[in-house]
Image (cartoon, grey):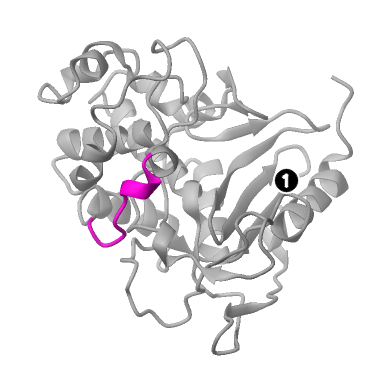
Amino acid sequence: MVAQNDKIIEERAYGLASVEFNVKNKIDTKFNIASITKMFTAVATLQLYEQGKLKLNTPIGEYLPDYPNQLVRDSVTIHQLLTHTSGLNNFYVSDLDSINPSNYEKVTDFVPLFVNDTLLSKPGTKYDYSASGFVVLGLIIEKISGENYYDYLKDYIFKPAGMAHTKALKVDSIVKNKASGYTSMFGESKVLKKNDYYLTKASPAGFHYSTLNDLFNFSKALRHYKLLRKETTELMFAPKVKGYNTHLGYGIDVDQRYNQTILGHSGGWYGIHTELMDFMDDHYSVVILSNIDEGGQTGATKVADFFKELIADKKSEK
């Protein structure tokens, strides 16, 4: 999907939602969006911040006094969780062999996967992409709001933004018009296989299902201050740390490698590649949802790179 000035220019669907049953993808098919979910968690956290219910630079023990890991409880801040500088790991990767796709109903169910792991670095000193940190943010959202994380998102993000088709689905859910995921092991295998083994129900770190239009509605609601006040939105969008490739704000990529800033987030996992990109100078929005991974040269990667170079020009010499 491509839009300019918040008006959709083009929507197209390619390929198959179900390879084995020859069901085509449609423009309203629900796709797993992987880590784009982190943007929802960041917005929820910042909503509580602007209500004065949490502080960004206070150790999380103020909000989770019973969190089992004392080092994390006493030294990690919400700012560090939002910027992947907490030292917490990415449990989806490090604990993949321990994950049983059917074991996770609540946010607390994910905590045993990482709570006793050694920190990768001293909090605040180094960028390490962390799914675990965003699960901790989900615990804080629940504790402060008094509401289940999934219900909180529905009430304060999905409904206000007009995201009726965005949901946290169980791995074995039977849902109409949902794309199955197929993995090529990131381009290493020519034989595709279903990715169900590698998934869980959505956590605060990833795996919600959504559609082109729902993600576009989220983008519009965020950019037009319907989810956060102007000053809080600007705080979210301001670059704070350098990640592996882009700079990061709070739960959002701030890509400054091109000739205009691109805000958004990507989602990549076995059988998933998604992109939400807002080109801030020319006011284009691009959403790409794919139910197959690749090695970084074809598929959704090639489409995303095409639009980055088309709209934001080729990379600046920086």
Between 59 and 43, the residue placed more toward the observer is 59
Q: Identify the residue at horizontal 47%, vertical 10% (top origin).
A: 125
97 in the magenta segment: yes
Q: Residues within 10 Å of mark 1 (few under 14, many from 20)?
A: few
Which residue is under mark 1?
283
Q: Residue furthest bottom?
A: 21
Q: Quadrant of residue 186?
A: bottom right
Between 72 and 9, the residue placed more toward the observer is 72
In which quadrant is the N terminus drawn?
A: bottom right
Q: Identify the residue at horizontal 44%, vertical 55% (top origin).
A: 161
Q: Is residue 224 visible?
A: no
In the shown orientation, is residue 280 left or right of residue 112? right
Q: Is residue 36 visible?
A: yes
User: The residue tagged with tag 1: helix, strand or loop?
Assistant: loop
Q: Identify the residue at horizontal 23%, vertical 38% (top origin).
A: 111
Counting the numbered discs, the total is 1
Pinpoint residue 199: horizontal percent, then vertical percent.
40, 58
Pinpoint residue 176: horizontal percent, then vertical percent.
42, 83
Give the residue type that dot 1 points to.
His
Pinpoint residue 22: horizontal percent, then vertical percent.
60, 89
Between 236 and 174, the residue placed more toward the observer is 174
Q: Quadrant of residue 53?
A: top left
298 in the magenta segment: no
Pinpoint residue 154: horizontal percent, then vertical percent.
31, 56
Identify the main secondary structure in magenta. Answer: loop
Vertical arrangement, residue 209 with respect to residue 203, above or below: below
In which quadrant is the C terminus drawn?
A: top right
Q: Which residues are magenta?
A: 95-103
